[in-house]
Image (cartoon, rainbow, N blue to C red):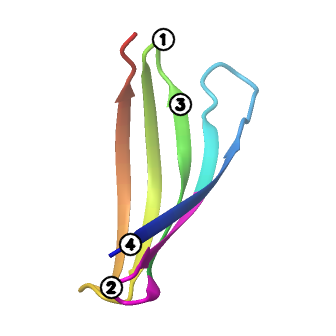
Amino acid sequence: MRDYRNRARVDIHTGGPKWTPDLFVWDEVFYYSKYDAWTRNRIAAGGRKTIGKRVVGNVYFQREDNQISSPAHINTIALLVEVRVQ
């Protein structure tokens, strides 16, 4: 069984004042050989802000459409905090 997924992402640097976040949008599709089909699609849009040398915060809206699982449509608002270890 082979599974495949691909995510295309566009990042937009907004520039400007120090506290202006960068914006992003991405779309991710999933192929499952078990079903011989592209069964899932996720799309997201949001903002990303560097808070310090090692901390980055992301807030975004994500929509998932799934042909196999239940529920078939999921909407989420996410907060992701990245801590970079050097």
Q: Residue at x 48, y 65 (%)?
A: 5
Q: In what element is the residue under mark 2? A: loop
Q: Horizontal placement of 61 versus 27: left or right? A: left
From the image, tell me which residue sits under label 4. 2
Work out whether 14 lies above or below 40.
above
What range of the chain is rendered magenta?
26-38
Q: In what element is the residue under mark 1? A: loop
Q: Main secondary structure of the magenta part?
A: strand
From the image, tell me which residue sits under label 1. 53
**Upstream in sequence: badge 1 or badge 2:** 2
Determine whether label 4 and label 2 are within 8 Å by CB. Answer: no
Residue 72 falls in image quadrant? bottom left
Q: Where residue 39 sits: x, y (%)?
A: 42, 83
Work out whether 58 lies above or below 38.
above
From the image, tell me which residue sits under label 3. 49
**Of the pair 18 and 66, the residue shown nearer to us:** 66
Number of other residues with Cα within 10 Å of mark 1, as a class: few under 14, some 14 to 19, many 20 or more: few
Q: Where residue 71 sits: x, y (%)?
A: 26, 85
Determine whether label 3 and label 4 are within 8 Å by CB. Answer: no
How far apart are the alpha carbons under marks 1 and 2?
44 Å
Residue type (three-letter) at the residue carrying disc 3 = Lys
Residue type (three-letter) at the residue carrying disc 4 = Arg
Q: In what element is the residue under mark 3? A: strand
- Indicate which label's residue lies in the foreground, 4 or 1: 4
- Indicate which label's residue lies in the foreground, 1 or 2: 2
From the image, tell me which residue sits under label 2. 34
How far apart are the alpha carbons under marks 3 and 2?
39 Å
**Upstream in sequence: badge 4 or badge 1:** 4
**Upstream in sequence: badge 3 or badge 4:** 4
Q: Residue at x 39, y 20 (%)?
A: 84
31 is within the stretch colored magenta: yes
